[in-house]
Image (cartoon, rainbow, N blue to C red):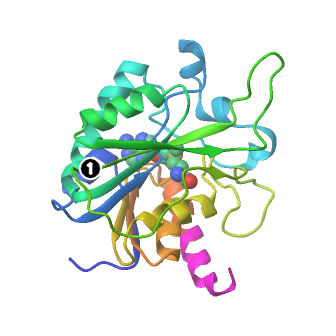
Amino acid sequence: MTMPLWRLDDAEALAWLASLDTAAAEAVITDPPYSSGGMLRSDRTNTTRKKYARNDSRTAGDDFHGDNRDARSWAYWMTLWLSEAARVVKPGGICALFTDWRQLPAATDALQAGGWVWRGVVPWIKPDARHQRGRYAQAAEFLVWGTNGPRPIVGDTLPGYYIARAPRAAENGPNKRQHLTQKPLDVVRSIVQIVEPGGLVIDPFAGAGTTLLAAAMEGRRAWGCENHAGHAAKARTRIAQALSQSVLL
Ligand SMILES: C[S@@+](CC[C@H](N)C(=O)[O-])C[C@H]1O[C@@H](n2cnc3c(N)ncnc32)[C@H](O)[C@@H]1O
């Protein structure tokens, strides 16, 4: 199949993955809904804006769905799409997905239940994270990663941690925050470098399209889906604009 450098479909992740060819991609690099955001059921079942909006993020995008599963349901659901992703990614290929401290144990279980070999956890440390009196700050999210069976030793060395502020609605350029849970573009540009140039990165939970943009900027091909039409449309605009100006970045 020939495809452009990047493509973002309006689709539901599980159905979309099932539609892709076997061993079509080099990696799935993604950021599924965390279904996190509180200790109580009433916290977790809040809207994503109530759970994840802070400071300057009032203008940073709509709510999104799929973020209210309890821990067991989330792990079952993760296993479903991770199993399908393991079919779509080539043997030896990569799975890397963001999660937070609450879901980290379930995420590493689900990765393995989905058929992947768990290889590690890369912290993304947020120096601007909210501090709380009498508690350690929750100043990190985590990239859980694994391989589709054994992986040959190829490519460059990669960082074991990242330190970066979350994107802000007030900034300009392609890192400007337009989605509640948008990841820093520079961090994701580094993450995608685990894939050989020209390799295909898929992202079934594209959000604002950070993975797709990062992959395209780094000379990897990128194909994703997003089931919220508004987010998908804004992501396509963001990616197209950023790539058309990327000579300036
Ligand atoms: C955590 S956000 C991804 C943010 C993204 N990494 C970025 O930097 O913008 C997860 C996204 O997955 C989407 N989503 C949730 N459930 C989905 C599903 N079943 N199929 C496709 N997309 C889904 C949500 O609408 C949301 O935009």
Split into 4 quadrants, where in the image is the N terminus? Answer: bottom left
Q: Main secondary structure of the magenta part?
A: helix
> How far from the left and from the top, in percent, is residue 137?
74, 28
Residue at the outermost right position? 133
**In the image, residue 70 above or below residue 235:** above
- Residues in magenta, as a range: 238-249
Which structural element holds mark 1?
helix
> How far from the left and from the top, in percent, is residue 153?
31, 64
Q: Amino acid at mark 1?
A: Ala
Residue found 54% across the figure and 27% down from its top: 36
Residue found 80% across the figure and 23% down from its top: 132
Pointer 1: what residue? 85
**Residue 55 can be seen, yes or no:** yes
Label 1 CA crowd tier, 10 Å (few <14, some 14–19, many 20+): many
Residue 6 is one of the magenta-drawn residues: no
Split into 4 quadrants, where in the image is the C terminus? Answer: bottom right
Q: How many marks?
A: 1
Among the 4 quarters of the image, the one containing residue 23: bottom left
Q: Would residue 76 be found to the left or right of residue 136 on screen?
A: left
**In the image, residue 120 above or below residue 75:** below
Residue found 53% across the figure and 25% down from its top: 102
Depth check: give the residue in front, 225 or 10.
225
Residue 240 is one of the magenta-drawn residues: yes
> How far from the left and from the top, in percent, is residue 198?
36, 78
